[in-house]
Amino acid sequence: MYQTMISSVNGKLCTDERGRPLERIGSMNVHVGDAVWTDGRVIYGNEFPSAGELLLFSDSGGGIPVAFGKQFYILSAKDGKIKKSYAINADVDIVGFVNNEQSAFVELTSDNGKTVDWYDLETGTLVYTSDERAADAQIETVLEEPGEPEASESSKENQGIEVSCLLTLEVGDIVGYKERKNIGLYKSGSLAVPLPTANEVAGAGLDMLLAEAESSDGNAYIQGHSGRITKGGNFYTTLANFSGHAKYLGPEIQLSSHAAVQVSATMDAQGRAYTENGALTWAQFSTNIQNPTAPRIPNGYVNETAADEVIPVLHGVGAVTTWVDPYLNLSAPILILISGGDNFVTAFPFEKEMYENEEQYWDAWGQCILLPDGSQFIKKKGDELLGGYVKPRSVYFYYTNTTANDTSTYRDRFPLNDDFVSTRSGDKWSITDGGKEVYSASSNFRQASLYRLRDGGYLLQNGSTADKIFGGRMGFICGSRNYRFCPMPDAEGVFRRLEKLIYEQYGMTEA
């Protein structure tokens, strides 16, 4: 018989400080850090609790632990129903919770989220403190190298000890994420894989836009951020939805041997930057020219014609064609630009003084400038030219450079926990399990987690609720701040350790 220190507890199975597995055969409660008597195989000792006192560990205490605010639930791994519910009487809120079969970590705040503390519920120790709630969390099991072997220890006992490592993903809080530094994947509180800030990502997008527009003048806007850690420690993030604007001055367009013109416009860009294990990729980047304008084309090329009746220019933003004036015995090549709706505009080539009266001038000017639907130009060449345009909300945009959307990227296919995937098609989001659809809705499932119940249904974590999915229908169970669901044989013991930790660190609320 000898004494040893306990380093981890999982129901009746314990591990000592040297990694030896030990089994409790008595009724004595055992905590991490306790010194116990053992023969190397079992832990000896009994105790007799007073009436109403709950054992720290019990065979009936297994289930799926779920934490939310000041509530703690144990759900059935069979059908997802609430087995037990506990209230926490303290000025602290649970804002995050993650566990695997053996270990659990909790994210607590006592100042409405200004700071959050991550605790290891196996040891009761503070892992680290942050100024934001993690976008996602996962537990990784790592092998800790053993110390110097003793003569009595076998080689098998010195192959290392499995320990739980907390993985958290921080991409910036709601208010300050644009400029927040030190974002990325953390391992037990240390930044392991850094990521660029949202502002840096937008800067990269703006650089692409300015290069496309050949401009040095532009600005950018940022929206959105999210992330997910999958089984095995792989992680994905969307750092920013990027939109930018830049001034655009097109190349000189030679209308004839006597005249040339340059188009000015606004070039816009849309893009979404994502990362896979820290590598930055643009899942979509596209630019378009909006509201192009051209200066008045000076007279001097009367009766000249374009080389072809219609010559597309600027990747479809406009075309060069021949204008035949209805009053003058003159023709001239003109640059026609798409404006909005079904209209085309151009710079009228002739001076007012060339007409017999002002009425003739304004009639000719109107026909040339407006080129309404049904005009000779649109009848002959409209369909051909419009084939190169996208027309959202009755305004023409011409996409000059589009990176094809890769449907296997984070933008359209979001990896959920373990084997589950969230996909988007139009306005519909679907969650699939091995290719089989589990649930679909217009809700965004980017941050959802799924757990397969034994009765064939699923537990869905999306936002701050635990819901039961069965037969394509959703039913609310309880509030949840879990990053994913996982059953534990000692879920009740986890709550007791959580309760003890909270009361020791934050105190009970006075009645």
Image (cartoon, grey):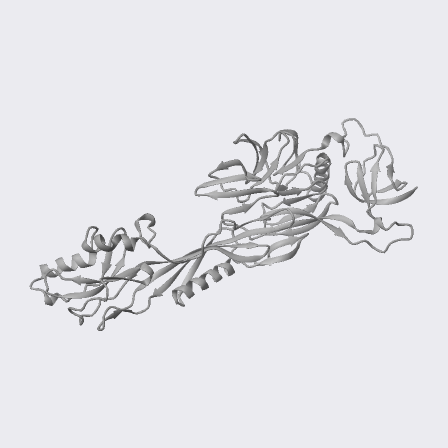
x then y, percent, for residue 434: 58, 40
Quadrant of the drawing holding the C terminus: top right
Pick out the residue farthest to the right.
Answer: 1
The answer, for residue 508, to whether it is visible in the render is yes
User: Is residue 41 placed above or below 195 in the rendered structure?
Assistant: above
Pick out the residue farthest to the top.
Answer: 51
Quadrant of the drawing holding the N terminus: top right
On the image, which quarter does residue 466 sit in? Answer: top right
Question: Is 180 positioned to the left or the right of 322 in the image?
Answer: right
Which residue is found at the position 86% from the left and 38% from the top? 43
User: Is residue 463 placed above or below 248 in the rendered structure?
Assistant: above
Question: Is 100 positioned to the left or the right of 269 in the image?
Answer: right
Which residue is found at the position 91% from the left and 43% from the top? 2
Question: Is 228 positioned to the left or the right of 335 in the image?
Answer: right
The answer, for residue 88, to whether it is visible in the render is no
Question: Is 82 positioned to the left or the right of 320 in the image?
Answer: right
Pick out the residue farthest to the left.
Answer: 356
Camera-side residue of 407 and 20: 407
x then y, percent, for residue 19: 81, 47
x then y, percent, for residue 195: 57, 58
Pick out the residue farthest to the front.
Answer: 308
x then y, percent, for residue 37: 89, 40
On the image, which quarter does residue 354 sit in? Answer: bottom left
